[in-house]
Image (cartoon, rainbow, N blue to C red):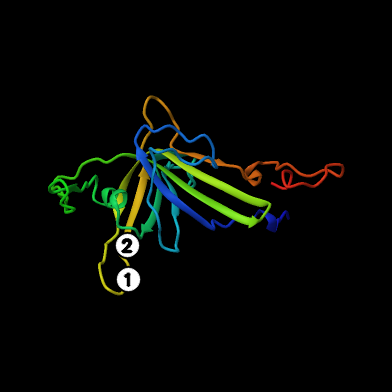
């Protein structure tokens, strides 16, 4: 039995960000996202829920009860969180592209229309999270979805006993242009390798080799 407690990871902090559909994949997991990206800000302590489901149906046979193979009928990759900041990017995503505009120049009064006709609002999405294990062991992870759209919203309750919360589930959409890439996971964590690099007896310990 191979167990290694040093490989346990905790998403200590992070954020979900959105950008226009077609925004290029980030270079890596640590470079700050460029100006095209807008962070959705604070979310509840539940963090982010990533869900992958594959819908498949087993073949049925006269001679045996066990399927001989499975026929794949669908796949879904979703990212869900409950956001606590009531700002443009959050409200726009929750209401399917909602945009506030000033009613008159300099009035500091704003208005938005909620359409009776739902429309597509495709975005690029990034989920960033960091695990601070120690001063010399910090790992970054970034999940990039080139095309995603809000597939489900939670009820938003406004009351004096709790901050406004905007619960949303983003679903990855099929890639375009013949690509088969639904999402990309970027990280600097060597634990994801099948054979992680290890220190040798002659290799001196340093901050660089401890990562």
| Rendered residue at 24%/44% (across/down) | 97
Q: Position of residue 136 (x, y in %)?
A: 68, 52
The crowding category of the residue bearing disc 2, from other C-alpha atoms within 10 Å (few below 14, some 14 to 19, many at least 20), is many
Above or below residue 160? Residue 205 is: above
- Helix, strand or loop under label 2: loop
In the figure, residue 153 lies in which quadrant? bottom left
The crowding category of the residue bearing disc 1, from other C-alpha atoms within 10 Å (few below 14, some 14 to 19, many at least 20), is few
For this rendering, which residue is in front, 59 or 153? 153
For this rendering, which residue is in front, 71 or 125? 125
| Rendered residue at 49%/40% (across/down) | 68
Please say if the residues under marks 2 and 1 sit with CB atoms less than 8 Å apart. yes
Asked whether, in this view, residue 1 is left or right of residue 119, the answer is right
For this rendering, which residue is in front, 75 or 179? 179
Q: Position of residue 142 (x, y in %)?
A: 51, 44
CA–CA distance in space, label 2 to label 1? 8 Å
In the figure, residue 75 lies in which quadrant? top left
User: What label does residue 165 carry, if any?
Assistant: 2
Q: State the count of labels.
A: 2
Q: Residue furthest bottom?
A: 161
Q: Position of residue 30 (x, y in %)?
A: 55, 42
The residue where tag 1 is placed is 162
| Rendered residue at 49%/46% (across/down) | 66
């Amino acid at each position: 039995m191979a167990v290694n407690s040093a490989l346990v990871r905790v998403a200590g902090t992070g954020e979900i960000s959105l950008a226009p559909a077609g925004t290029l994949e980030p270079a890596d997991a640590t470079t700050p996202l460029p100006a095209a990206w807008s962070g959705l800000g604070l979310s509840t302590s539940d963090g982010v829920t990533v869900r992958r489901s594959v819908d498949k149906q087993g073949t049925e046979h006269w001679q045996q009860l066990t399927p001989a193979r499975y026929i794949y009928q669908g796949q879904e990759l979703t990212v869900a969180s409950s956001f606590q900041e009531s700002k443009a990017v959050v409200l726009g995503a929750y209401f399917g592209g909602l945009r506030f505009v000033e009613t008159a120049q300099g009035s500091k009064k704003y208005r938005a229309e909620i359409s009776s006709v739902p429309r597509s609002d495709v975005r690029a999405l990034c989920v960033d999270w960091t695990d601070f294990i120690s001063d010399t062991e910090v790992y970054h992870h970034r999940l990039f979805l080139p095309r995603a759209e809000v597939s489900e919203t939670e009820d938003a309750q406004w009351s004096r006993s709790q901050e406004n919360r905007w619960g949303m589930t983003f679903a990855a959409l099929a890639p375009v242009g013949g690509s088969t890439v639904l999402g990309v996971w970027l990280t600097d964590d060597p634990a994801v390798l099948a054979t992680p690099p290890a220190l040798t007896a002659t290799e001196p310990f340093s901050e660089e080799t401890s990562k």
